[in-house]
Amino acid sequence: MKIVVIGAGIVGVSIARVLSMYDGLDVTVIEKQADVGWGASKANTSIIHPGHEENPREHPLRSKLCVEGNRMWRTWVKELDIPARWPGELMVFTSSEEEREARRYVELAKLNGVTGVRVVYDRELRNLEPWVNPAATGAVYAPTAGTISPFEAVIAIAENAVENGVKLLTETEARRIIVKGGVVEGVETNRGFVEADVVVNAAGIHADEVSHSAGVEEEFRIRPRKGEYLIYDEDASVKPARILHTVPTPLTKGVYALTTVHGNLLVGPTAEDLPYEAKEDVSTTDKGLKLLSREASKLLKELPPKSKVVRTFAGLRPEPPKGQWLIRAYTDPWGFLNVAGIRSPGFTAAPAIASYVVQLIAETYDIQLRRREKWNPYRVGPTRVNGVGLDAVDSIIRKNPDYGEILCYCRMVSKAEVLEAVERMKTIGVKPTLDGVKFRVYAGLGKCQGSFCRWRVAAVLSQATGVPLYKVAVGAEPYAFGDVKVLLKGDPSASEGV
């Protein structure tokens, strides 16, 4: 059976990985971006939520899959060598009104079977988190919360899925689901027709449009909800031990302050509902960033100076009607599934969503799932020199001198790591790009944001791929621009000396 998954975000690649466990399934993932995980999956808060903020009376499936996903990630991060930590989280309150609202989540934790959730005060609160604001009167402590590297998670899952036989087609946009006689035949894309017996729509913020093209759920519309973020340099002294956040509102889970797995202070997100047409608006605003600073000041006893902010960014979350995830298999047309409107905590729930969807496929279309004997659950992450002891680094360099040539000093990324990233991208069928390297080995994610290393990495990419320097892509667009591009294009030899 041929199965096409539309969308290579965290949900799409997770579904592909689980499908790859079974015999007789020919699985293809199509993604309109140049790489995996470049939508909402990379621009989020990087939290594995415990599940105590989900109301099972209002969203039973969402609640169930969030709790299951939290548990499953414990296994997935080990199997796939994904950077993750499990520090727990504190929902901080500063008034009796906020305390009453926060206590409601202790009850939800009991309903959802989330263990260890309780209210903490005074000394215990400050022992758990020395950086908490002195004005905090208490917090709801949820010990099973985790943080993860979101972009590395998507990459790791995609690599494992491809190793297990999944085909990945990037720069391939789904334009229309082809249905004949009430049966799905495949997907029309910008690169031609892709045949399929079953199509799984996991297209993120554009999933409603894909669904409409199949003649399904034509009243269903996804609104873009923007979340803005601040990220501080690694050397900023403020590094909370726990995940801190304000008491949730009807619109958002609250603003978070946390230390990422890479050692940066991250603050966010805002929550701004945009017009339906603004599905590509990932701009940041002065208003949004000021709000983040105010909210973070309620959580932390101090904030690093603004000079320590190394990046601001925004992501778009797919907000469905009434917050309801749309996970459904259809028999009219036969072979079409929606996995749409997967707003927070979609990243947390992704492994559980994947298992749920695969069972739904089997039950709806009467497929007998037979586990493959040689399915490989493991993936090994890239070799790094940053954070490795001197003796180990010396041994690595003796084996491959390219590990001794550092291209990115902020993150201590070597030439060998960039070359390995290029090979990993080629292996899964992704065109090597500067952003692709950045999200795999962190070159350009440090203090200078690529000001020092980007051209050096671009030169290595040019040499490794045979692409002229001015044609090396950042994301979808070439690195060079304006007069520089014209100059290099006019004199091909110039790229060799840059």
Image (tube, rainbow, N blue to C red):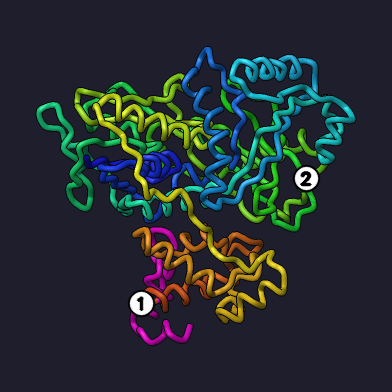
Q: Which residues are magenta?
A: 469-498
Of residues 8 and 484, the one nearer the viewer is 8
Write the residue at 22% across / 47% down: 189
| Residue under the image location 36 percent in, 29 percent down | 359
Q: Is residue 142 above or below residue 282?
A: above
User: Number of marks in the image?
Assistant: 2
Residue tagged by mark 1?
A: 466
Q: Position of residue 412 (x, y in %)?
A: 64, 69
Farthest left residue in view: 181
Is 223 magenta? The answer is no
* Direction from residue 259 to residue 451 in the image, left or right: left
| Identity, as a three-letter code, of the amino acid under mark 2 | Leu
Question: Gap between marks 2 and 1, in whole Å?
Answer: 46 Å
Residue 491 counted in the magenta span: yes
Q: Residues within 10 Å of mark 1 (few under 14, many from 20)?
A: few
- Label 2: how many Cα within 10 Å (few below 14, some 14–19, many 20+): some
- Residue 288: image quadrant is top right
Mark with earlier residue (2, 1): 2
Percent x, y for residue 142? 70, 29
- Tell me which amino acid carries mark 1: Gly
Q: Nearer the viewer, mark 2 or mark 1?
A: 1
Q: Position of residue 9 (x, y in %)?
A: 42, 44
- Mark identifier at residue 391: none
Of residues 86 and 243, the one nearer the viewer is 86
Which circle marks residue 303 in the picture? 2
* Numbered disc 1: secondary structure: loop
